[in-house]
Image: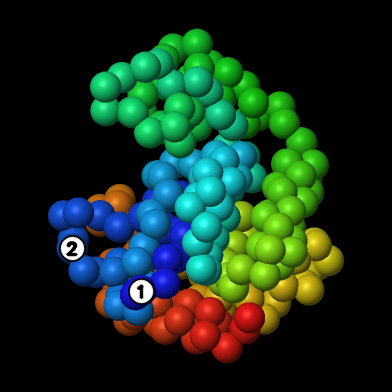
Amino acid sequence: MKKKLLVVGDSFMHPDPEYAGQHWSEMLPDYEISMFSQSGSSNGMIANQFFEGLELNPDAAVIGFTASDRIEFKLEARPEDARNNNSWITGSHAALNSVQKIAADYYATAVCQDMQFFKNLLLARSLLLTLEKKKIPFAYTCNLLFNHLDDQEGQAQVDKYLGEFEQHRCPTNLATYPNWKASPGFHTDDPEWQTRFAHEVHTILKIIP
């Protein structure tokens, strides 16, 4: 029987059905994938995906975090949004109504980015600590949470709050891919990047309990 792998995150962590077999999550034949990631998610939405997914008692987990400036809005009920983790959208979503767009724009200009980064790092830390406490093998990537690799101050913050989980971090950050594209939906269409990330996930989950 295959082990159950929980995957949470935003679009980088979610396969695109029009590009079957090209996403890293489709390159792990040893696992049955429980795909909870959702395009455009905030880290709050990712936390919701995470705790919903834990109810399935996964054998392992992969988390991809996202940008700290995404805020959530309640999604107006639609038939295609039946799953609980489709209850919200963020400021990056095309389905925002006019009031939500104004709020998202205002938030982007008025919010303290440093405080948002700090809060999102602590949220990320809480998920990783939960997995550690439950003794669930896991791998993670910062993705859009921190993809400015020349930002030494930001790197120091990441090291401070997430550094103890370094052995679980995938060396490849898919959100640093230089030729980002809207399509496929997972943005990083280079087979080498996807294959490498899949290999890193497999190696981390196999070696680190």
Q: Secondary structure at mark 1?
A: loop
Q: Which of 132 and 73 lies nearest the eye of the viewer? A: 132
Residue position for label 2: 20
Q: Which residue is the extreme one toward the front?
A: 1
Image point 55% across, 52% down: which residue? 54
Q: Which of 179 and 59 lies nearest the eye of the viewer? A: 59
Amino acid type indicated by mark 1:
Lys
| Picture layout, residue 69 above or below residue 188 | above
Judge from the rendering whether residue 194 lies leftward or rightward of residue 105; answer left or right: left
Image coordinates for residue 18, horizontal then vertical, percent: 16, 55
Residue position for label 1: 2
Image coordinates for residue 13, horizontal then vertical, percent: 42, 58
Judge from the rendering whether residue 165 lies leftward or rightward of residue 8; answer left or right: right
The C terminus sits in image quarter = bottom right
Image coordinates for residue 39, horizontal then vertical, percent: 40, 44
Amino acid type indicated by mark 2:
Ala
Image point 48% across, 52% down: which residue? 56
The N terminus sits in image quarter = bottom left
Q: Secondary structure at mark 2?
A: loop
| Picture layout, residue 77 above or below residue 26 | above
Disc 1 crowd rating (10 Å Cα; few below 14, some 14-19, many 20+) is few
The answer to the question of whether label 1 and label 2 lie on touching residues, with beta carbons closer than 8 A, is no
Where on the picture, by quarter, is residue 130? bottom right
Image point 35% across, 66% down: which residue? 32
Image point 42% across, 72% down: which residue? 3
Question: Does the image show residue 99?
Answer: yes
Where on the picture, by quarter, is residue 119? top right
| Picture layout, residue 135 above or below residue 36 | below
Q: Which of 71 and 13 lies nearest the eye of the viewer? A: 13
Image coordinates for residue 187, horizontal then vertical, percent: 34, 58
- Report, in whole angstroms, how far the alpha carbon at label 1 lies from the one at label 2: 21 Å
